Image (cartoon, grey):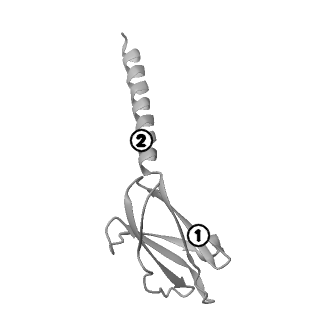
């Protein structure tokens, strides 16, 4: 076999491995938890911070849910994505104002990413 043939086989093998890794990552990490809470009624609320982690009261991760993203009828809904499927997560939410002031944590909830 020529050098070109070996390179072609290696390139095809690398491509197949890359696709398999990408697919495996997305199957494993495409879990989500849908959250819903009562919206804060203060007029200067800009949004919410959703804190989460895999141990109780330990939140190494957070995302921002802007007030206008999902508020409807006094309820806020947020889809927490990119989680590991079937893993248990602990979650708490805070509200923050337009000036950056942040509330205390909500009560903690727990759930499994699906």
| Location of residue 58 in the rendering, given as x and y in whole percent from the top left corner | 32, 72
**In the rendered image, which residue does mark 2 sit on?**
24
Residue at x-position 37% and y-position 57%: 87
Q: How many marks?
A: 2
Residue at x-position 49% and y-position 58%: 32
Q: Secondary structure at mark 1?
A: strand
Residue at x-position 35% and y-position 69%: 60
Outermost residue toward the right?
Answer: 73
| Location of residue 55 in the rendering, given as x and y in whole percent from the top left corner | 31, 68
Residue at x-position 40% and y-position 54%: 84
Outermost residue toward the top?
Answer: 1
| Location of residue 68 in the rendering, given as x and y in whole percent from the top left corner | 65, 74
| Location of residue 27 in the rendering, given as x and y in whole percent from the top left corner | 45, 45
Q: Quadrant of the N terminus?
A: top left
Q: Does residue 83 sit above or below 23 in this rendering?
A: below
Query: Disc number at residue 43?
Result: none
Dividing the picture into quadrants, the one containing residue 56 is bottom left
**In the rendered image, which residue does mark 1 sit on?**
77
């Amino acid at each position: 076999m020529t050098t070109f043939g070996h390179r072609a086989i290696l390139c095809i093998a690398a491509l197949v491995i890359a696709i398999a890794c990408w697919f495996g990552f997305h199957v494993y990490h495409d879990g989500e938890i849908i959250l819903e809470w009562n919206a804060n009624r203060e007029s200067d609320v800009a949004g919410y911070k959703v804190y989460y982690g895999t141990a109780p009261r330990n939140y190494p991760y957070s995302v921002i849910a802007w007030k206008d993203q999902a508020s409807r009828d006094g309820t806020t809904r947020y889809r927490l994505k990119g989680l590991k499927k079937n893993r248990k997560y602990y979650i708490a939410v805070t509200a923050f104002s337009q000036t950056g002031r942040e509330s205390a944590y909500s009560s903690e909830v727990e759930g499994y990413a699906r």
